[in-house]
Amino acid sequence: MKITVLSGGVGGARFLRGVRAHVREAYPDGAGGSTASVTAIVNTGDDMWLSALRIAPDLDSITYTLAGESDEERGWGRVGESERVSDELRAYNIGWPWFTLGDLDIGTHLARTSMLRDGLTLAEATDRITSRWPLGVHLIPVTNDEVETHVLTQDGADLHFQEWWTRHRATLPAARFVQQNVEAALPAPGVVESIMTADVVLLAPSNPVVSIGTILGIPGIRAALRATRARVVGVSPIIGGSVVRGMADACLTAIGVETAADAVALHYGSRASGGVLDAWLMAEEDASLAPAVEAAGIRASVVPLWMRDTETSAALAAAAIAAATHSNT
Amino acid sequence: MKITVLSGGVGGARFLRGVRAHVREAYPDGAGGSTASVTAIVNTGDDMWLSALRIAPDLDSITYTLAGESDEERGWGRVGESERVSDELRAYNIGWPWFTLGDLDIGTHLARTSMLRDGLTLAEATDRITSRWPLGVHLIPVTNDEVETHVLTQDGADLHFQEWWTRHRATLPAARFVQQNVEAALPAPGVVESIMTADVVLLAPSNPVVSIGTILGIPGIRAALRATRARVVGVSPIIGGSVVRGMADACLTAIGVETAADAVALHYGSRASGGVLDAWLMAEEDASLAPAVEAAGIRASVVPLWMRDTETSAALAAAAIAAATHSNT
């Protein structure tokens, strides 16, 4: 069983933890692991250069979460963090005072930056960084090229996504999201292959605009999703008309999509009509919206979507895989 | 009074602290500072790229010492250091395991690297970094260009100076020191001017080969030292046939110079004969060597050289300035 997951950061990380738990149980290898292989194609649009560091928030969120090193209480970053280096950077007026980098996290950024400086690609650097822990999931950045998401606000400002998201908490009305240099970008080696050879392709309940949307914007990804023989199943990041976490509603509003489980499914579209979805998992709260999804040619499954812990995340992953592999939902 | 000091790291830092203390007393500005201006031209041959960081050990040693932030007990780095980032880098197999970077120190390296990435020169970055503290000394890297000292060992190995010095404790017999790309290097803006317009030029008791020697190797520096109307006074780093600190003897041996106060003076040479010195301060222990120095056309002053504290360092600085400004030593 080969499972490929398109994923953003924190929500994607929790979903991937569920996928890993599920496959260890459903496809055990007898040694605590799984005979199934799980590949995560990870958004890099939030990546940036800051204080001479190459920062890849989504790759790191997933790595730390799968490694058991994430700060679950705070919801981001490494557990047991300190901020001695950031205090120094602030004293030198370097970086963004509103974007604090933890010392342990800086270790990862420095390792990545050092490898890039030595000529490794981001994917190669990711392989080396993740090899520190037995993650059970193969992480591939969607592209090795620097394709950073910028936000053009309605007031005409052009901000890196992180500035709009973290500094302004997505409160500046966005007019448009731009993936800089996306035309020239290539999927990282293995990305298209992992979609084409998968038994199941899942879209994590990540931000549909700046996480999954950024992945879909890389030339070649949509074509692979349309061509693969695997079923493509998405998980709604919207429950009962609200985003589960983050501020995806501000992103959806900017691109004219309602913050609703059916609207996001229709935004992705059915494979039959040039979109990317075969099936869509939506919450019980949104059962009334299922017919609209089905009418668009996307099979809707109504299941519990809240990922409260590893068990509920694993059940969600199981439901997603079931939606892809069984004829009945 | 304008004083220009050619300087390496730790020894140079202590000497500069003495110069600063002396000028505050001898040329007070009435506000705790001095009407004299002190410029340090600092060796950059020990600089390197490591773990994606641009590291400038001598600039930082001087900055931390003059800022009162240096770890006096350990003899290097920042006081109150921790090593959380370095532990991470080690876990990722990044960098040199034998070269530990402190967290506070990494803050400085990241600030510098970030500024260089933004297009600032090393001198401009140094101005911004040092502006954090009222140092009382203007630090200028001898060059903005990357001229790193490599050691060719007698066994044919080619090591960055730091590897030879810190990892191997200068125990691998050196055949030669090479300043990479020195032919194309230019003195940083202000370096030649600070020598030409100085009232006094001092050579700190730093390593004559890889600190002062590296400075003298940058095209234009020797010519400026020969052309300036200021007297050029050197302070012996050798007392009683031993180096005061560090392993300069290994460097001197490699270039065929005896570890002796007179031999180093003759190695620098008198300005009258194409060298750089007008006068030379040597320790009472080496008084018997003074005639040899005088015979080479360099005025020898026998004074206490041990810098035990700020007072003794200030007295040494006073003696050096006196040797430059008075006709009698």
Image: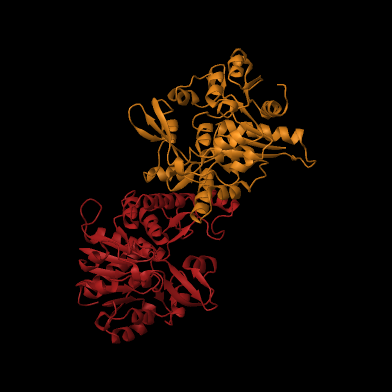
Chain colours: A orange, B red
Q: Quadrant of residue A195?
A: top right
Q: Quadrant of residue A150?
A: top left
Along the horizontal axis of the image, is B165 left or right of B45?
Answer: right
Residue B52 vs A139, above or below: the answer is below
Which quadrant is the C terminus of chain B positioned in? bottom left
Residue at 59% across, 28% down: A271
Depth check: B40 or B216 in front?
B216
Which quadrant is the N terminus of chain B positioned in? bottom left
Residue B281 vs A308, above or below: the answer is below
Where residue A246 appears, x then y in whole percent? 51, 27
| Total marks placed | 0
Along the horizontal axis of the image, is A152 left or right of A320?
Answer: left
Residue at 58% across, 34% down: A7
Along the horizontal axis of the image, is A38 left or right of B154?
Answer: right
Depth check: A313 or A120 in front?
A120
Depth check: A51 or B197 in front?
A51
Where residue A250 appears, x then y in whole percent? 45, 24
Does the rendering let one see residue B204? no
Where residue A57 appears, x then y in whole percent? 52, 39
Residue at 40% across, 63% down: B9
Residue at 23% across, 50% down: B31
Where residue A174 appears, x then y in whole percent? 40, 27
